[in-house]
Image: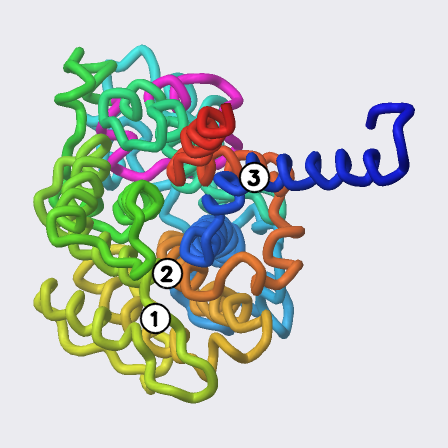
C-alpha cells in the first residue's frame, strides 16, 4: 500500500489490488468444480475403504469355523475394531503351503534348492512361521491395523501410478513390484499367496524374464485377491479421465470405459497368468467406474448400484445379487467368492444403509471381518466400492485413525489423488493463465 496521498486514493488502490487478486485466482477456483470435488472425495474414500477392509479382516482371515471360532480367539463380540492377529491358529494350512512355489508343499518342490523363495527372496525372515510342525496364523507378524501383503503391494502400485504421471504402466509396476518384494524389511506380513511364490520361483529357479514369470497352478491363482490391483488401476484411470475432461455430467465414454477395463486387465497380468482373472478384472473395473460416477439418492430411494451389480453378475455368468441374503463365508476362488461379494454390495450400497450416519461403511467392513473365510481381499474390494459410494467427508474417524500407517497412508493417498486428477498439471495451467 503506497504511503502519502489522500485516504480516498489509498482506498482506491486497495480496491484495485483486491480485484486484481480475485481476477488471477479465478482460474484456480474454477478448477475445483462440484464435479471434481465429488470425484476426489469418492476416490479418497475408496482407497481408505480398501486399506480398512483389508486390515480389519486380517485377524480372521481363513477362519472357516464360523463366528464361534472368531469368538474363541477374539472374545464374545468378535472383531470390533483393528485387532492384532493371534500367533497360533489351529487348522492353519500355512504349514502345508509350499514356500518355493504354488499350492501345497511337496518334496520335489523344495528339494535341491540352496535358497528358499519365502525367507530368502521374499518375505524375508518369515520361513520359520511356515514350519510344517507348527500351526501359525497367516498374518501372525502383523500389528493391529497393519495391512496384509496384497494391500502393501497396492501401495506400490499407487506409487508407480504417481511416478508415471497418473497412468498405469505395467513395465514400471513390474520393476517396482520386484524391487519391493526382494527388499528385506519392505513389509511385515507372514504370508505370500501362490501367485507371488510362483512368480519368484520362475525368476530365481528357472531364470525366466520377469515378463514371463506370472504363472498359474490351476487352483489358487484365479482368486479374489487378484482383483485388488485392478481395483486401484480402475480408480486411477476413471478419475484421470473425468478430471481430464470438461465433463460436468460425469460420463465416461464407451471408448474410455474400454480403456479403463483393458488397463485393469493388464494390471492383473503383471503378477498372474489367468485369462479368467483378466476377464473378471475388466468386468470389475466397470463396477468401479459406476461406483465413482453414479449419484446417491437420499432417504430410502431405490439403490442406484443395483443395476450395475446385476450387469456384473450377468457378465460373469452369475445369478442376480440379492440384498436380503445373509452375509456368507466363502473361499478365495472367484466362482465361490464373487456371488456373496455381490450380495453384500447389493445390501450395503442401499441408500437407507449408506445414509445411516458415518458408521455405515464401518459396520459393513466389520461384518465382513466377522464372517471369516477369504474375507481379507474381499474386504479390500468391498471397501473400494463402498468407499466410493460414501465419500471422504462421511468416513467415520475410527476407520482412518486405527490404521497402523495412517499418517503415511494419508500422504500416499494425497499424492495419488493429485497425480490421477492432474492437479499439478491443472495448477501449472492456472499459473500460466495468470501470467
Q: Is residue 100 left or right of residue 410?
A: left
Label annotation for residue 80? none
> Do the residues bearing badges 1 and 2 touch, measured as CB atoms within 8 Å?
yes
The residue beneath circle 2 is 385
Q: 23 or 269: nearer the eye?
A: 23
- CA–CA distance in space, label 2 to label 3: 39 Å
Q: Residue at x 22, y 64 (%)?
A: 336
**Mark 1 or mark 2, earlier in chain:** 1
Residue 50 in view: no
Q: Is residue 210 left or right of residue 365?
A: left
- Please say if 14 is above or below 403: above
User: Where is residue 15 drawn, in percent x and y?
Assistant: 73, 41
The residue beneath circle 3 is 23
- Please say if 144 is above or below 350: above
Q: Residue at x 58, y 69 (%)?
A: 78
Q: Is residue 395 magenta?
A: no
Q: Nearer the viewer, mark 3 or mark 1?
A: 3
What SS does tag 1 mark?
A: helix
Start-end of magenta stretch: 178-200
What SS does tag 2 mark?
A: helix
Q: 120 or 226: nearer the eye?
A: 226
Amino acid at each position: 500500500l503506497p504511503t502519502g496521498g489522500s485516504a480516498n486514493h489509498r482506498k482506491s488502490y486497495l480496491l484495485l489490488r483486491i480485484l486484481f487478486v480475485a481476477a488471477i485466482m479465478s482460474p484456480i477456483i474454477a478448477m475445483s468444480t462440484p464435479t471434481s470435488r465429488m470425484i476426489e472425495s469418492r476416490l479418497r474414500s475408496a482407497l481408505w475403504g480398501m486399506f480398512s477392509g483389508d486390515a480389519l479382516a486380517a485377524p480372521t482371515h481363513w477362519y472357516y469355523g464360523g463366528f464361534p471360532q472368531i469368538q474363541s480367539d477374539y472374545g464374545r463380540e468378535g472383531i470390533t475394531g483393528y485387532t492384532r492377529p493371534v500367533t497360533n491358529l489351529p487348522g492353519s494350512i500355512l504349514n502345508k503351503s509350499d514356500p518355493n512355489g504354488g499350492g501345497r508343499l511337496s518334496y520335489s518342490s523344495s528339494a535341491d534348492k540352496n535358497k528358499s523363495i519365502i525367507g530368502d527372496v521374499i518375505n524375508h525372515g518369515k520361513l520359520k512361521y511356515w514350519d510344517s510342525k507348527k500351526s501359525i496364523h497367516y498374518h501372525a507378524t502383523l500389528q493391529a491395523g497393519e495391512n496384509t501383503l496384497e494391500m502393501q503391494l497396492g501401495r506400490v502400485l499407487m506409487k508407480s501410478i504417481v511416478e508415471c504421471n497418473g497412468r498405469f504402466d505395467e513395465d514400471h509396476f513390474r520393476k517396482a513390484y520386484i524391487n519391493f518384494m526382494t527388499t528385506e524389511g519392505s513389509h511385515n506380513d507372514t504370508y505370500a499367496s501362490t501367485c507371488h511364490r510362483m512368480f519368484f520361483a520362475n525368476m530365481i529357479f528357472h531364470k525366466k524374464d520377469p515378463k514371463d514369470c506370472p504363472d498359474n497352478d490351476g487352483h489358487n491363482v484365479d482368486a479374489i485377491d487378484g482383483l485388488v490391483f485392478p481395483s486401484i488401476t480402475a480408480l486411477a484411470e476413471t478419475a484421470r479421465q473425468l478430471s481430464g475432461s470438461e465433463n460436468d455430467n460425469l460420463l465416461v465414454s464407451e471408448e474410455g470405459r474400454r480403456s479403463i477395463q483393458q488397463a485393469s486387465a493388464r494390471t492383473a497380468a503383471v503378477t498372474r497368468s489367468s485369462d479368467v482373472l483378466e476377464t473378471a478384472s475388466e468386468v470389475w473395473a466397470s463396477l468401479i467406474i459406476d461406483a465413482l460416477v453414479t449419484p446417491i439418492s437420499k432417504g430410502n430411494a431405490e439403490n442406484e448400484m443395483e443395476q450395475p451389480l446385476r450387469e456384473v453378475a450377468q457378465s460373469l455368468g452369475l445369478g442376480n445379487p440379492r440384498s436380503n441374503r445373509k452375509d456368507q463365508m466363502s473361499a478365495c476362488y472367484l466362482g465361490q467368492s464373487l456371488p456373496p461379494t455381490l450380495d453384500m454390495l447389493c445390501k450395503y450400497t442401499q441408500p437407507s444403509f449408506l445414509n445411516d450416519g458415518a458408521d455405515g461403511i464401518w459396520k459393513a467392513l466389520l461384518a465382513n471381518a466377522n464372517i471369516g473365510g477369504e474375507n481379507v481381499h474381499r474386504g479390500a474390494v468391498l471397501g473400494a466400492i463402498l468407499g466410493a459410494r460414501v465419500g471422504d467427508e462421511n468416513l467415520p474417524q475410527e476407520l482412518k485413525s486405527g490404521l497402523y500407517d495412517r499418517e503415511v497412508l494419508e500422504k500416499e493417498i494425497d499424492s495419488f489423488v493429485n497425480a490421477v486428477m492432474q492437479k499439478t498439471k491443472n495448477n501449472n495451467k492456472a499459473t500460466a493463465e495468470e501470467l
